[in-house]
Amino acid sequence: MKVLLEPFDDRMQDWLFYISACTAVVLAALYLSGIDFSDFLPGCYIYGRYHIYCPGCGGTRAVRSLLGGDFVQSFLYHPFVPYAAVVYILFLCSNVLYRLRAVKKRFLLRPVYLLAAVAIIIGQCAVKNLLILL
C-alpha cells in the first residue's frame, strides 16, 4: 500500500510534465479551431452490438459538457472526465509554477491516482449497466 502513495520519481514527473504541456498546447489548438471533432467519432461498437455500456461510454459527452462549463452533467455522463481534468490541471499548473520558481512545492503524481481512475471507470460502467437491468 505504501508503494501506491509514494510519488513517481523526479525523472518520471518531468516526463509526465512535458507530455502534459504538449497535450495542453494541442488541446488548446483543437478547441480554438472551432471544429467539433465529436462529429467524426463513430458510435460505440459495444453498445451498438450488445446494448451494454462499455467503460468509455459517455466520455465524449462528458468532455463536451466539461468544455461547455456544465460540470455536473459532465460528472453524470462519465465521472472519470472531471476527475482527470482536476488532476491534470493541478499537476500542470503546479509544475509550471514550480519551474518558474513561483512555488517551492509541486503536485506530484502517484500510482494511487491511476488506481482511483481505474476504479472510477469500472464503477461507472458497472453502475450504468446495473441501471439498465432495473
Image (cartoon, helix red, strand yellow):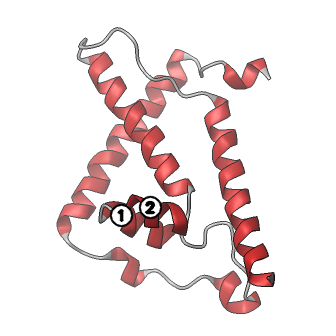
Q: How crowded is mark 2: few (under 14 residues within 10 Å), some or many (20 or more)?
A: few
Q: Which residue is drawn at 76% across and 66% down?
A: 126
Nearer to the camera, 92 or 22: 92
Amino acid type of the residue that numbered disc 2 sits on in the rendered structure:
Val
- Residue 52: image location, x then y, percent: 74, 82
Q: Which residue is drawn at 42% across and 64% down?
A: 63
Nearer to the camera, 35 or 18: 35
| Residue at image mark 2 | 72
Furthest residue to the top? 104
| Residue at image mark 1 | 70
Query: Which secondary structure lies at badge 1?
Result: loop
Asked if residue 27 is positioned above or below residue 53 in the image, the reply reads above
**Total number of numbered discs in the rendering:** 2
Query: Which secondary structure lies at badge 2?
Result: helix
Q: Quadrant of the N terminus?
A: top right
Q: Do the residues labelled 1 and 2 touch (CB within 8 Å)?
A: yes
Furthest residue to the bottom? 49
Asked if residue 74 is positioned above or below residue 12 in the image, the reply reads below
